Image (cartoon, helix red, strand yellow):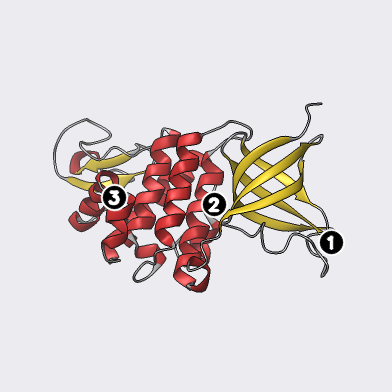
Amino acid sequence: MPGPQKARAIVLSSRPLGEADRIVRLFTRELGRADAVVKGVRKTTSRWGGRLEPFNVVDLLLHPGRSLYTVTQAQLVDVFARLRTEREGLSAAAIVCEAAAGLTPEHEPEERMFALLRNTLRELDKGISGRAVESPLVLGALLKLLYEAGYLPVLDHCAACGSGGRALGFSAARGGLVCGDCAGEAVPITPEAVEALADAVSRSLADLRERPSSPAAGEALRDVHRLYAYQTGSRLRALRIAGVG
């Protein structure tokens, strides 16, 4: 069995284990996505403090086990304190972290996706206006994560026939926008949502954070979520909690 390994990680989520421990889901730069046990973290005398809370960036020492790592050391790198004081910021962080977890296999390093997720959390920590589910930044982050996973939707022509006709629908099964002739099972889409999708792909995360939340971005996010669910076989719980099916 290999020895202890150092890794920089984003804490994606956590869940209780027994009376005193937790299992944390990590997205590490060096080891890819991995789950690890943190022993004694739920005790009132825990030495861990808040270092292993979701959305923190931490430097870890991980000991491999049969199925899980065990965290033996943790040093904070980024806390994103403002994000934690704003409900919509927390909602947005939960959405993008859950999406990253669903799009990455275990134990396969994805340095570009790690950097993308960390940069998204940095932008969210600067504050977003309006609802997370109508935020161009959240829409853009999800689209860029899909791109890194190889699932970016087709937006510049009909995903079914390849024509450059006007997009009238979004089809998760076809992989993007479709024209009127190919609409079939596609969900109707407004021109404003088509524009929101194009903006979200072409603009940087910093630019998207500056753009106001809008119903068009919310409509586009619902369509992108359908594509995510089609490709991964699961829906984002964080979006369901926020009221997006």
- Residue receiving disc 2: 98
Q: Locate the N terminus by quadrant.
A: top right
SS state under label 1: loop
- In the rendered view, does 149 fall on the left or right side of 25? left
> What mark, if any, has residue 200 been given in the picture?
3
- In the rendered view, does 208 fall on the left or right side of 180? right
SS state under label 2: helix
Q: Please name which of the two marks, 1 or 2, marks the residue nearer to the observer.
A: 1
SS state under label 3: helix
Mark 3 nearby-residue class (10 Å; few <14, some 14–19, many ≥20): many
Q: Quadrant of residue 148?
A: top left
Which of pointers 1 and 2 lies earlier in the amino acid sequence?
1
- The residue drawn where x is 83% and y is 67% is 45
Residue extending farthest right: 19
Q: Amino acid at mark 3?
A: Ala
- Residue receiving disc 1: 20
Query: Of 191 and 34, which appears nearest the observer?
Result: 34
